[in-house]
Amino acid sequence: MANKTNFSIGAVIALLVAAYFGIDLQQSKIEPAATGAETQQQKSEAHPYHPYPNHSKSAEDAPQLDTARDDTQRIAEAFKQQQSNVQVQASGKVKAVLRDDNEGSRHQKFILSLRNGQTVLVAHNIDLSPRIEQLQKGDTVAFFGEYEYSAQGGVIHWTHHDPNQRHEDGWLKHQGKTYQ
């Protein structure tokens, strides 16, 4: 059963990556990667960037969400090293809203441009979490999910709770509302 599930997940990711290749053929340049010493120093320091500087968290969100965390550099490193299965949190501006993927588990898809210029495809499972209604190009979306390498910049998935409790829960945040 696990192999069938893994195959299904792999097929969905392959479809999303294929769709992504067809939409964004102009890869944005990313900032030069930090040296090993700089990377260690960055990991040990608190990130000052806050994706919603004028937004205070609601009481229900406060214990779950660390919206001040920014793993943009970690995503750039994972891309450079072609790593996958990296749990990350960051935010970006919507570059394009794509059609939903309705094969198998349904996914809302959109492309985010991170603050370093790198783009990532977000594949948000709308069978397990509410979709972001009224999502538009230029909107800011914060996310906590799993990064998977692709040549176009990568895919962010697992942006929802895991009903089987086998994976860390993820989320999206848009205009002060959390989608989990």
Image (cartoon, rainbow, N blue to C red):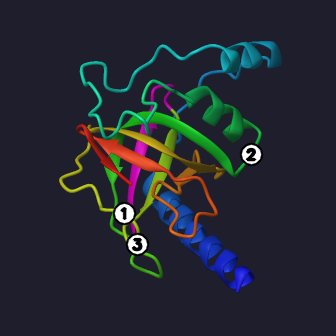
**Amino acid type, residue under disc 1 in the picture:** Ser
| Marked residue nearer the N-terminal end (2 or 3) | 2
Q: Nearer the viewer, mark 1 or mark 2?
A: 1
Q: Which residue is mark 2?
A: 82
Q: Is residue 26 visible?
A: no
Disc 1/disc 3 C-alpha distance (Å): 14 Å
Q: In the rendered structure, which amino acid carries the disc numbered 2?
A: Gln
- Per the image, the residue denoted by label 1 is 129
The disc labelled 3 sits on which kind of residue?
Answer: Asp
Residues at discs 1 and 3 in contact (Cβ within 8 Å): no
Res 75 quadrant in image:
top right
Quadrant of the image for the N terminus? bottom right
SS under mark 3: loop
The count of marks equals 3
Mark in front: 1 vs 3: 1
Q: Residue at x 52, y 27 (%)?
A: 70
Is 110 a magenta residue?
Answer: yes
**Label 1 Cα neighbours within 10 Å, binned few <14 / some 14-19 / many ≥20:** some
165 within the magenta span: no
Magenta segment main secondary structure: strand
Label 3 belongs to which residue? Answer: 101
Q: List x then y, in percent, for residue 176.
A: 24, 37
Residue drawn at point x = 53 percent, y = 35 percent: 118
Q: Nearer the viewer, residue 138 or 3?
A: 3
Residue 11: percent from the left, percent from the top? 61, 75
